[in-house]
Image: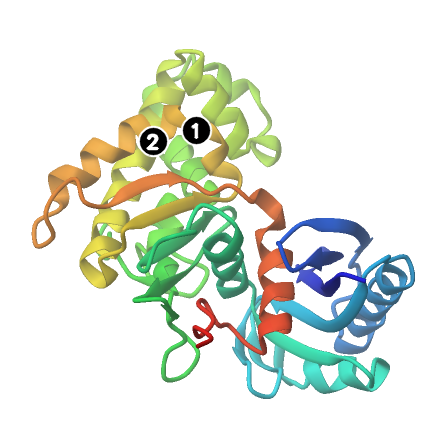
Amino acid sequence: MARAAIGVDLGGSHVMAAVVDEAGAITGREERDVIDRSPAAVVEALVAVVRTAIDGSKHDVGAIGIGSPGNIDPSTGTIRYSPNFGWENVPLGDRVKAAFPKFDVFVGNDARCATLGEYVHGIGQGTKDFALLTLGTGIGGGFVSNGVMAIGHQMGAGEFGHHQIRPDTGFVCGCGKTGCFEAQASGTGLMRHALRLAPSFPRSALLDVPREKLGSKAIRKAAQAGDQHGLAAFAAFCDDLALGLANVIAFVNPEIIALGGGVSSAGDFLLDRVRPLVEARTTMVPRGTTRIVRATLGNDAGAVGAATAAMRGGLIAQLPLVA
């Protein structure tokens, strides 16, 4: 029977458990909405989807990996701080282990798990230096340097979304700072650019959309259709995205930067605008040596990476060679 693990993608509004084999293929999945964000309720929902996934699996499941938002100590599985849930020092690993005592349990940051998934089973295969950025409501990320996943002294390596690119004129970030990369260049940032520019486009079709329903997808589609308001917002967004990506190149010098998340679905419409802007801002690294591409695993990257970490015993990007 093939070896597999359960990969859990734990989000603020849902939890998904997938059966993932050693090749990174998902052979089954279970999902449940998260309504109550208290630790007890979230653990109950998580345990339920994991149990159903295990019971329905045709594989030999040997471990459970969980990707969760927040600052997490992967050696203990304790979520030290998670603004998404409002948690501090929640021993998630211990609670899941108590429900599944026969299984190894791994808990890691969701963005770092997604990075591992893309590196091992996605667009990062064959590289030594790789970075993933997920462009959604915020910006998550992680990077592999010389084949090693960067974790950091206090588990914070790869938090690209919270370096400031517009500290004087930017939008206020959820973290409290002004002009963070994710405040400017996430899906939320694209909406904020559109709202900031709205007075210059009083006849824009985007203004007919109720503000509470205006999302990054609508703005992107308006830009692709040639709407001047949408194009202006998308241009401002791409300029900020390029500024942050050029900084990532200076910080970690990856061979590939993969863009995931909902905003990346713009594909070439996004990449064709961002790449030359990044090149123009790249100085201390030879231009043209970092490829900026779309991630390939989509929303499954976190679950695939969490399962991979569970099978490998941690966020291990490259397994040691066997003599």
Q: Is residue 132 left or right of residue 116?
A: left
Q: In the rendered structure, are the residues bearing label 2 and label 1 in contact, judged by CB atoms less than 8 Å apart?
A: yes
Q: Which mark is residue 271?
A: 2
Where does the image place residue 184, in percent across and percent down from the top left? 35, 46
- Report how far apart the C-alphas of labels 2 and 1 lie in the structure: 6 Å
The three-letter amino acid code for the residue at tag 1 is Gly
The residue shown at (64%, 72%) is 310
Say above or below: 164 vs 150.
Answer: above
Question: Where, by quadrant of the figure, is residue 51 drawn?
Answer: bottom right
Q: Sort mark 1 into few (<14), some (14-19) or many (20+) by Cα contacts within 10 Å.
A: few
Q: Sort mark 2 into few (<14), some (14-19) or many (20+) by Cα contacts within 10 Å.
A: some
Q: Which residue is mark 1?
A: 267
Where does the image place residue 262, in percent across and percent down from the top left? 53, 39
Which SS class for mark 2? helix
144 and 312: which one is in front?
312
The three-letter amino acid code for the residue at tag 2 is Leu
Q: Which mark is residue 112?
A: none
The residue shown at (18%, 45%) is 289
Is residue 228 something one can see in this rendering?
yes
